Image (tube, rainbow, N blue to C red):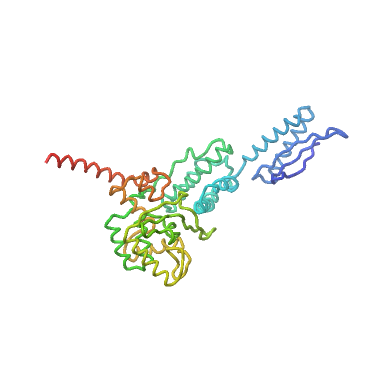
Amino acid sequence: MASTKLMETKDGRRFFKISVSRGYGKTPYTKRWYWPEGWSKRAAERELAKVAAAFELQCGKGEVLNRAEQKEQDRAAAAEAAKLKTVRQYADGVFMPTKEASLSENSRYSYRLFLDRYILPVIGDALLVEVSPAMISKLILDYQKTGKAHASAVKLYNILNGLFDMAFMDESIKISPMLKVKRPAPRKGEVAESEAEKALTVDQLRRVLSCVEQEPLKWRTYINLAADTGARKGELCALQWSDINFATGVITIRRNLQYTPAAGVYETSPKNGKGRTVDVGPDALALLRQLREEQAATCISRYVFTVDGVADPMHPQSPTHYFKKFGERYGIPNFHPHLLRHTSASLAITNGADVVSVSERLGHSDTAVTLRMYAHANEDSIRRAGQVVRDALKAQNE
């Protein structure tokens, strides 16, 4: 009768060694059967009994493979067993470790949050091969029903798509269920705004700059600089005095300050991985000079924007909190730091700046990103260009 012994490989994978006697003094026939991940002890032992009985019968008929053939069969069986992963096992063991190699800390935290809070509690214990398009569609629909924004629903969809596409590419599944899942549409009554539509008009921006005149110098400088340069909030929080050339009116954006609960405050490179230079107007430069003098009276810091009275850089979430209160004080709805970035880009394009230059100024990795985000603004500038031609023709006729 076949005997079995539970063993483990050097990398921690469990398998059963099945042995069938060939008679006294002879090396027994042996076979490995790997314990599939996610299987209970009862299910594994039940399947092992079937495999052992079949192997014993095969030995009795003289059908046992030679060593080389046996190794190849074991390798194939191990590969097949490895495919039997739950969504949780695959997400934690393959998907996230792979993504972490290319994601920023902030993006990694966001992926992890979506997985732990919205995806794994729903389908985490299901085998990859058992997840259906209907299960994913319901997951996304239930998420939208909680009132989450359309952009967040799209992000959830993209993470799911990335996970199952990876599983398909490494042959853990034969087909991705996402092929039959539609990208989420805005809920009824919810309009997905373009980036350009989120921007302030010239008059609205003038009002913001007028209101900020009543605020502390640090925030007057921050808001004027954000509107002037279109820099990201983390890039401004990471700005150092050595990055500013007061003689030429140019700042160099070399770093980005970020925060996640897991990592705390940390410094990284700008979003596209490379620095850039941005010109600054005289009003913003004058405020920077004043801020440098004011800061020097209380502390010496290499950072431009600091925690009040100390040398530490301003927390990267402070602008978000301040902008919210500022908007409430002056009746400016949905006022947040990124709004000034949108505004700077949108106004630049609608007033004649070429997209390539705007893209460089914003630090986009690709001009196509700028075109996609600010297509509405670009259409305005195109219409204005057409009107210039019509006006020129009309002037010649007169």
Question: Going by the image, does 338 lie left or right of 129?
Answer: left
User: Which x, y percent locates residue 19?
Assistant: 79, 37
- Whole-percent x, y for residue 337 in the image: 39, 58
Count of number-bearing discs: 0
Q: Residue furthest right?
A: 24
Residue 342 at least partly seen = yes
Check the image and name the residue furthest to the bottom.
297
Lateral position of residue 365 relative to residue 3, left or right = left
Question: Which quadrant would residue 366 be assigned to in this image?
Answer: top left
- 189 or 350, which lies in front? 350
| Residue appearing at x 51%, y 39% in the figure | 177
User: With respect to residue 224, does 127 lie above or below?
Assistant: above
Of residues 61 and 282, which is closer to you in this image? Answer: 282
Across and down, in percent, residue 343 comes to: 33, 54
For the C terminus, give its image quadrant. Answer: top left
Q: Measured along the vertical axis of the image, is residue 79 above or below residue 283?
A: above
